[in-house]
Image (tube, rainbow, N blue to C red):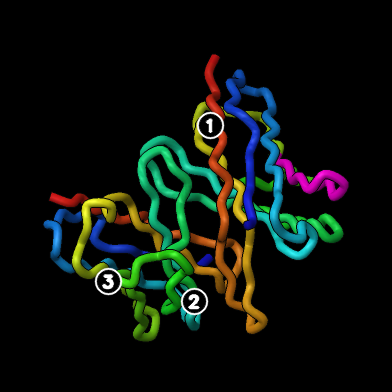
Amino acid sequence: DIQMTQSPSSLSASVGDSVTITCRSSHSISAYLNWYQQKPGQAPKLLIYAALSLQSGAPSRFRGSQSGTDFTLTISYLQPEDSGTYYCQQSYSIPRTFGQGTRLEIK
Amino acid sequence: QAQLVQSGAEVEKPGASVKVSCQASGYTFMNHHLHWIRQAPGQGLEWMGMINPSGGSTTYAQQFQGRVAMTTDTSRDIVSMELSSLISEDTAVYYCARETKWPGGNNWFDPWGQGTLVTVSS
C-alpha cells in the first residue's frame, strides 16, 4: 500500500497569512494526488485534483504543487472560512489512501 | 449537477450487520465507479472499497475482505454497502463518493454523499 505522510498535524494562523501543508507519498504516484477540505459535521470537499488543478468553485487562494513525491497545498490570504481539516489522497493505486489530516485553526 | 444522497443513521448491536445506501442523481450512473470511505469519531479517512455500477465488479480493502459487500441497483441508481459482524470499532460516519476520471487515468472523489452515522453499541 502507498503511505501518505501529511504534515503538520495541526496549525494555527491569522487572517491574511499564508500557510503550507505538505504530503509525502511512500512511492512515486506521478500527479495522482488530490486535496480535500472537511469542515466539522460535513463531508470532505474536493479542492485540488491531479496535484495542481483547482476544482471549479474553489477560491484561487488555494494552490497545489509537486516536487517528486512531495506535494504541497498552499493557502494564501487566509480567510475565516478556511478553518477545517485538510486531507491529501493518492489515486494512483488501490487501495486508495489518505494522509492523516491537517487541522487548520484561524486565529 | 451530480449528487449523492445517503440513507439515515443506524444503531446496531455488536455482531449484527448494517446496510447503507447511496442514491445517485444528476449524472449517468453507469459511467462512474462509486467508493465507500469511513471516518471514525475524531479520526481520519479510511477507504473501504469500490464498485463499478456497470457490471457490478467490486474491489475491497484487505481489512474488510469477507465482511463487506457492495452492490448496485441500476434500475434505481443506488449503490449499497453492507458491513457484517459489527464491532464497536466500526462506529463511524460512512461516506459514498463518486470517482471522476480523466482520460489519462487521473481520478478523484467528487461529489461525496452527506455521510451516514453507524453506531455499534450493546
Q: Chain of mark 1?
A: B
| Disc 2, SS | loop
Q: Which residue is identified by label 2?
A: A50
Amino acid at pointer 1: Leu
Specify the segment rendered in magenta: B72-81
Estimate how packed mark 2 is, as few (under 14), some (14 to 19) or many (20 or more) residues with alpha carbons within 10 Å.
many
Amino acid at pointer 3: Thr
Q: Is residue B77 magenta?
A: yes
Amino acid at pointer 2: Ala
Q: Which residue is identified by label 3?
A: A74
Is any atom of residue A103 visible in this view?
Answer: no
Checking the image for residue B117, the label placed there is 1
| Disc 1, SS | strand
Between the C-alphas of marks 2 and 1, the distance is 30 Å
Estimate how packed mark 1 is, as few (under 14), some (14 to 19) or many (20 or more) residues with alpha carbons within 10 Å.
many
Between the C-alphas of marks 3 and 2, the distance is 15 Å
Image quadrant where one finds the N terminus of chain B: bottom right
At x 56%, y 73%, the residue is A92
**Pointers 3 and 2 within a single chain:** yes
Is any atom of residue A7 visible in this view?
Answer: yes
Q: Chain of mark 3?
A: A
Which callout, 3 or 2, points at the residue further toward the start of the chain? 2
Q: Principal SS element in the magenta part?
A: strand
Q: How many marks?
A: 3
Q: Nearer the viewer, residue B69 or A65?
A: A65
Q: Is label 1 or label 3 in front?
A: 3
| Disc 3, SS | strand
At x 58%, y 76%, the residue is B106
